[in-house]
């Protein structure tokens, strides 16, 4: 069985691939697109671009999904002259701390960190004529610290050694050559390419008026950077008049993690889709009758089809690029011939090949731009993901540059960061190793607690519907409910793959899922997941606990849990109306409106009340499985459904891949997985015993309105309590919370919990804060995104005023985007209205009469 699981992705020491090129003007959209496609083709991480010719007043955009970050220097004196840029690939480990831009657009300096190294990178476009003032200005900005490594890239319009770097018959140093040599000597800079090719003659620029080659595009490095250079290469002169020069810079103690992922574009190709479908159909025809276990049959299909798809994609890419690769090889050959024997014959042959290659690149770029324009025409102004991405405030980088350890030390090494995250998450996902389902003492304590909670149970008909065999219609409906384009799980198969071949997979999937309902175990592959760490907004990014671990699960696993979400329609009968999270026909504003009304009741009735918002620490991740399984049994979950859930939580694992570090494996022994469709339903069921016990506990007093007493409101793990007689109620409440925590793992963080009193003497508030370590004050607290205050007349200023200010700021920022009126209307619908709906329970102030 284990042999059918995914092979672990290989990890290897990684390199930063740098590329420098003189673009000779990028104001043409076609040329910008050609550059970006070239950077992708060369697998560039950091691009140094000279002669952008951008205007400083309204520069064009030079970015795409792969290069979302760019730094630019413009000529503020003479627009559309000079200009340099540095583009940084998405998720590149190079972190920019500060930048210096030359007002004449001649150089750009970035002070960065790379892994744990301090690094200064410079992009330089030197004047074509000798300019002592330029070199003096550049020298004044050079780093002086001996520990800071330096990389200069650019077009220096000069050579370090004319005898070998020019093809001119007269080897005389120009004044510019002497200035460059003096600059390199002063700052101890070395020519990276010449260090690796000491006896080779190669060039980056051809001067048509002089009919000579020269090597004026350079990578200059400080001496301590040389050991990190793997290789440097001079490419051919293609779409620009300069050759691009590349350098691979080894990142110390940095590892790259690669995992296979299906490229959905392959499924849009009719021939490839047919080939994959034929391979899948042939596999199931040959093996369905010969393999006893439907789970093994399905798991093995992934391995077989993965190999077929990889071979198919490789062959398709090789065929697609065959003509381009042949032209590039021919161009390189013609260049070598012309450099060795510069004659009219070799020059014309070189120009013919270069013209043919440029025509091919222009045609490819035009075709790509046509496709992009069509996509933008069709979708850019609709309420769709393309418009949502455009409205997104900024690009969120996956790189975590530093982290604070449990001992308080800040680490920057990727391996140290991964180790700290791994230890933190392992402690969360295995916080109670001594608690097991078979522990009789624990079982008795849980049963006693559940019995006192007096929970409702499923009826016989509901239980039969819940435990009924899975039908093919359910599998198809579950799959169709998932949106395409989402990140896949560890197996790499996307949702579109399942939707495309649903007619082939429907029967094997249904048989496998019914086998799981009968008690067959899942494979290790299906139970594995990849963790994505999402930083919590407004929280300290150095604290590892301020990241939300989202599990990227395999699609076949998610389909099964989506089918098991047939439990959802029965939740309103099992869960009290106080809980509005993930329960059908209930919304968060039901509870926020109730809280506002109860504040008004407490004020008008002069009732001593404490309003308490409890912060649960990693509530979904800490839920213990014994408590979850016993709760499911207690509410009448049928045997087959219970068996399926225990199969899901048999021995799940997670892989934590962080850029620059070897992935950490985490064994999960508690918690419901965030990212699983069934997870919120299970959590809502498991927290209901606590809420029910609070409601039935006569020693915990709430606010009585009519015949109803309101003590607690909940949205999943967000608890809001309204306690009258808090001096008496709080001891019993925290006693109950401690008991529940020992059984379920639900732990309250008192330090992050907040409370405010109404009609409570200051001495009583201080005593409660002291005895229970609660931050009690008259300051507003936040519940479900709404700021609540003991003074209702402040609610508008606390909520609507900052919201309207933010909305106005967002709308103003949209004015600078190319969005039509229809797009702006959809932007309001997508971005503004949901925020207003969140605040709809907050009352408006009464209009003042004149």
Image (tube, helix red, strand yellow):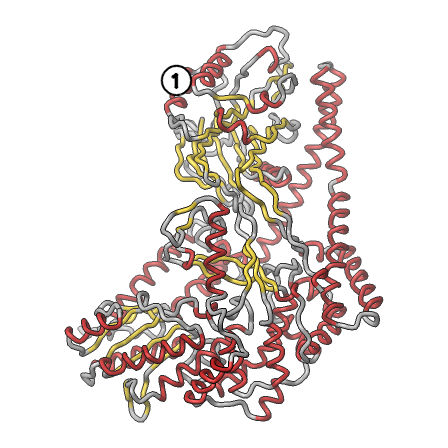
Q: Residue 105: x percent and y percent?
A: 44, 29
Specify whether 248 is left or right of 701: right
Disc 1 is placed on an element classified as: helix
Q: Nearer the viewer, residue 177 or 508?
A: 508
User: At x 41% / y 20%, what residue is drawn?
Assistant: 134
Q: Is residue 181 above or below residue 769?
A: above
- Residue 553 appears in view: yes
Say which quarter of the image contains residue 703.
bottom left
Q: Is residue 358 above or below residue 40?
A: above
Q: Nearer the viewer, residue 564 or 848?
A: 564
Badge 1 density bin: few <14, some 14–19, many ≥20, Cα 10 Å: few
Q: How many marks?
A: 1
Q: Is residue 619 above or below residue 16?
A: below
Q: Residue 29: x percent and y percent?
A: 56, 39
Q: Quadrant of the N terminus?
A: bottom right
Q: Is residue 850 above or below residue 491?
A: below
User: At x 36% / y 84%, what residue is drawn?
Assistant: 694
Say which quarter of the image contains residue 772.
bottom left
């Amino acid at each position: 069985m284990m042999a059918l699981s995914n092979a672990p992705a290989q990890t290897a020491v990684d390199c930063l691939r740098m590329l420098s090129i003189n673009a000779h003007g990028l104001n043409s959209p076609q040329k910008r697109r050609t550059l970006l496609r070239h950077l992708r083709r060369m697998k560039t991480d950091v691009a140094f671009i000279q002669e952008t010719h951008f205007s400083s007043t309204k520069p064009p955009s030079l970015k795409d999904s792969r290069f979302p970050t760019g730094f630019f220097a413009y000529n503020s004196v003479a627009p559309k002259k000079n200009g340099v840029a540095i583009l940084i690939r998405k998720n590149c480990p190079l972190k920019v701390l500060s930048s210096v831009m030359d007002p004449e657009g001649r150089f750009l300096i970035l002070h960065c960190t790379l892994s744990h190294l301090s690094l200064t990178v410079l992009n330089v476009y030197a004047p074509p004529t000798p300019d002592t003032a330029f070199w003096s200005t550049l020298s004044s900005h050079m780093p002086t610290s001996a520990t800071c490594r330096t990389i200069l890239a650019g077009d220096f319009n000069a050579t370090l050694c004319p005898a070998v770097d020019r093809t001119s018959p007269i080897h005389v140093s120009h004044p510019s050559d002497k200035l460059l040599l003096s600059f390199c000597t002063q700052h101890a800079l070395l020519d990276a390419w010449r260090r690796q090719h000491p006896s080779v003659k190669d060039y980056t620029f051809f001067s048509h008026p002089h009919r000579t080659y020269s090597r004026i595009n350079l990578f200059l490095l400080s001496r301590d950077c040389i050991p990190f250079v793997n290789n440097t290469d001079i490419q051919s002169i293609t779409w620009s008049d300069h050759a691009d020069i590349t350098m691979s810079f080894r990142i110390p103690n940095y590892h790259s993690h690669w995992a296979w992922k299906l490229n959905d574009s392959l499924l849009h190709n009719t021939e490839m889709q047919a080939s994959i479908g034929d391979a899948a159909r042939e596999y199931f025809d040959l093996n369905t009758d010969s393999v006893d276990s439907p789970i093994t049959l399905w798991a093995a299909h992934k391995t077989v089809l993965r190999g077929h798809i990889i071979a198919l994609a490789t062959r398709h890419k090789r065929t697609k690029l065959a003509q381009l690769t042949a032209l590039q090889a021919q161009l390189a050959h013609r260049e070598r011939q012309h450099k060795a024997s510069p004659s009219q014959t070799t020059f014309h042959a070189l120009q013919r090949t270069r013209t043919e290659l440029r025509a091919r690149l222009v045609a490819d770029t035009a075709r790509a731009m046509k496709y992009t324009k069509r996509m933008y025409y069709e979708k850019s102004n609709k309420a769709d993901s393309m418009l949502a991405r455009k409205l997104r405030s900024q690009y969120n980088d996956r790189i975590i540059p530093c982290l604070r350890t449990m001992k308080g030390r800040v680490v920057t090494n990727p391996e140290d960061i991964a180790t700290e995250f791994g230890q933190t998450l392992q402690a969360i996902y295995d916080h109670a190793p001594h608690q097991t389902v078979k522990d009789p003492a624990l079982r008795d304590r849980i049963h006693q607690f559940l019995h006192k909670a007096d929970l409702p149970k499923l009826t016989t008909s509901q239980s039969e519907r819940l435990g009924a065999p899975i039908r093919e219609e359910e599998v198809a409906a579950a799959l169709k409910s998932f949106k395409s384009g989402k990140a896949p799980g560890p197996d790499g198969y996307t949702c579109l793959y399942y939707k495309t071949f649903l007619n082939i997979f429907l029967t094997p999937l249904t048989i496998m899922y019914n086998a799981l309902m009968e008690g067959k175990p899942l494979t290790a592959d299906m139970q594995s997941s990849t963790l994505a760490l999402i930083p919590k907004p407004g929280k300290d990014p150095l604290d590892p606990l301020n990241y939300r671990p989202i599990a990227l699960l395999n699609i076949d696993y998610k389909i099964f849990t989506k089918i098991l979400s047939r439990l959802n329609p029965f939740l309103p009968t099992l869960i009290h109306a106080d809980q509005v999270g993930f329960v059908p026909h209930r919304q968060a504003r039901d509870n926020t409106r109730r809280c506002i009304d109860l504040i008004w009741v407490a004020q008008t009735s002069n009732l001593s009340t404490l309003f308490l918002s409890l912060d649960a620490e990693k509530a979904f991740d800490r839920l213990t499985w014994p408590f979850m399984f016993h709760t499911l049994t207690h509410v009448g979950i049928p045997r087959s459904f219970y068996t399926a859930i225990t199969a899901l939580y048999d021995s799940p694992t997670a892989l934590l891949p962080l850029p620059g570090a070897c992935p950490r494996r985490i064994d999960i022994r508690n918690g419901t997985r965030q990212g699983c469709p069934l997870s919120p339903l299970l959590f809502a069921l498991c927290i209901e015993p606590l809420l029910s016990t609070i409601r039935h506990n006569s020693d915990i007093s709430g606010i009585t309105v009519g015949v109803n007493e309101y003590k607690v409101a909940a949205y999943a793990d967000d608890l809001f309590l309204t306690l009258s007689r808090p001096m008496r109620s709080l001891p019993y409440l925290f006693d109950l919370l401690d008991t529940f925590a020992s059984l379920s793992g639900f732990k309250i963080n008192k330090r992050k919990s907040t409370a405010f009193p109404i009609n409570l003497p200051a001495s009583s508030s201080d005593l409660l804060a002291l005895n229970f370590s609660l931050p009690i004050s008259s300051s507003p607290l936040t519940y479900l995104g709404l700021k609540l205050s003991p003074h209702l007349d402040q609610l508008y200023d606390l909520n609507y005023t900052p919201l309207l200010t933010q909305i106005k700021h967002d709308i103003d920022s949209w004015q600078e985007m190319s969005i039509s009126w229809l797009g702006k209307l959809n932007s309001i619908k997508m971005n503004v209205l949901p925020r207003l709906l969140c605040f709809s329970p907050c009352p408006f102030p009464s209009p003042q009469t004149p």
